[in-house]
Image: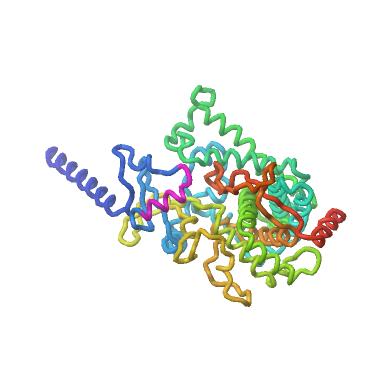
Amino acid sequence: MAAVLGVSSVLVASWKLCRRGAKRKRLPPGPPRTPFLGHLLRVPRELPWVKYHDMCRELGSDVVALEVLGTTIIVLDSAEAVNELLERRSHIYSSRPHLPMICDLMGWEFNIGLMPYGERWRMHRKMFHQSFQSSAVTSFHPQEVKAARQLVQNLYQRPEDFTTHFRLMAGYVVLSAAYGIEPLGEDDPYIKISEEAIHYLVEAAVPGAFLVDIIPAMRYIPKWMPFAHFQRFAETSRNHIGKMRQSPYEEAKSSSGMSSSFVQKRLKEMDQTGDTEAYEEVVMNTASAMFVGGFDTIIAAMSAFLFAMMTHPEAQRRAHAEIDSVISSGLPTFEDRKSLPYITAIVKEVLRWKPVTPMAAAHVLDVDDEYRGHFLPAGSLVIGNAWAILNNEATYPDPFSFRPDRFLAGKDGSMNPCPDPDFAVCPGRLMALDVLWISIASILTVYDISKGVDKQGHDIKPVYEPGPSSLVFMPLPFTCTIKPRNAKAELVCAMLEDWS
């Protein structure tokens, strides 16, 4: 009997190994494996969107698989694959990876972008969707117009500090829209809190930055031990994140503020419906996700816009001509949007040309799945390469050129049904598009944007390089020249100074 059991055990083990090997053969193609390490050394740390795209081209597949320490990473390099798996099969692809460092130790588990799929996630998603759908985001237009006016004025006073001005503009929009709070200027404490929290998140999001993400049991190591730097890092980060999440929320609760702010609208609904404390937690979490999620993306997109204008003067001239034909005095409003299709096309092309999130957030596959005859195992990390999709020459001819007219159907200015690039912004993309449109339209009404010059008066060659963030394509500092276009523009700036 023992012999029979022994033989049976061997057969079962052999069957499992064969089955595992068969499944591995059925995985999407991947690069050569290293013994014991699998594809650990093949996971790109710099410019992953470019490296993964090159990998897909070398393998002749828009879906590739890498096996890293027992986890399968599936990279989707085409819109077709993303739409089929992450959209049509979203019921099994909507969960998120559990990140011990970021979620457990640093305290980001409240963020909807890091929540596992389930009832809690659905509650947050529902509230976010209701508050930022097309019929709701127009309520934020007054804050966005005011922020754009202030941006134009700040650029007139100190044009060289454009990144600082973008930071203040983004901070004003998200603080006022989410909480009804107006920032106190460049040194506003809430903006600083958000930047500090994002700083720690960016550091922790670098693949392989902390060993605890590979060996989760390390989370139990006491912080006083010599090699527990990650615990001390997490504790400091957790303090900043707690302030970022709670401080503006508590102020919004205790003051009358702006009645159109997200928090105050939702709290009024809670009072009317008699919801529990769980509802209030969803409000606080959703507001903080809006706060931190809309900050860097707006700054990165506005930086890309400046770079595009100074390196493509022909596009800027066309934008100026369109604005001059519509705006006779003052600055544009959202009512002018339909009459300024080229400005809308510029916004779309900025987001396509330099996508702010070139690699989409990772999803987790809940159950075994199959796609085009390939086996996709449960627990796989599934990542869409937004950069590759937005640079697909079949969809966007001459993809590396900045060409806003690709989104225009004809001379009448109607919009081309060319696929929108806004999916690569964030879940609150409708609000982000409004912010970018009114800001870009306002800047182009008043300013000429050209290359920076050195002390000898020579043009500085513009270079657009990504910073250290693996979450948002935030460029390293660059220079440009921003000057009023004409006497009318000077008058607008003077009027803004009087208005402020």
Residue 231 x %, y %: 53, 30
- For the point 38% across and 58% down, the residue is 62
* Magenta residues (range): 45-57
Front residue of this view, candidates 253 and 476: 476
Q: Residue furthest bottom?
A: 412
Q: Name, please, the residue furthest toward the right.
A: 498
Q: Is residue 130 visible?
A: no
Task: Please say whether residue 421 is visible from this viewpoint.
Answer: yes
Between 285 and 331, which is closer to the camera in this rendering? 331
Residue 490 location (% of width, % of height): 81, 57
Residue 49 falls within the magenta-colored stretch: yes
Q: Residue at 50% across / 51% down in the picture?
A: 361
The N terminus: image quadrant: top left
Against 36, residue 362 (above or below) is: below
Of the pair 8 and 467, the residue shown nearer to us: 467
Quarter-of-image position of residue 341: bottom right
Does 19 lie within the magenta span? no
Instruction: Report the side of 248 relative to 285 (left or right).
Output: right
Residue 420: quadrant of the picture: bottom right
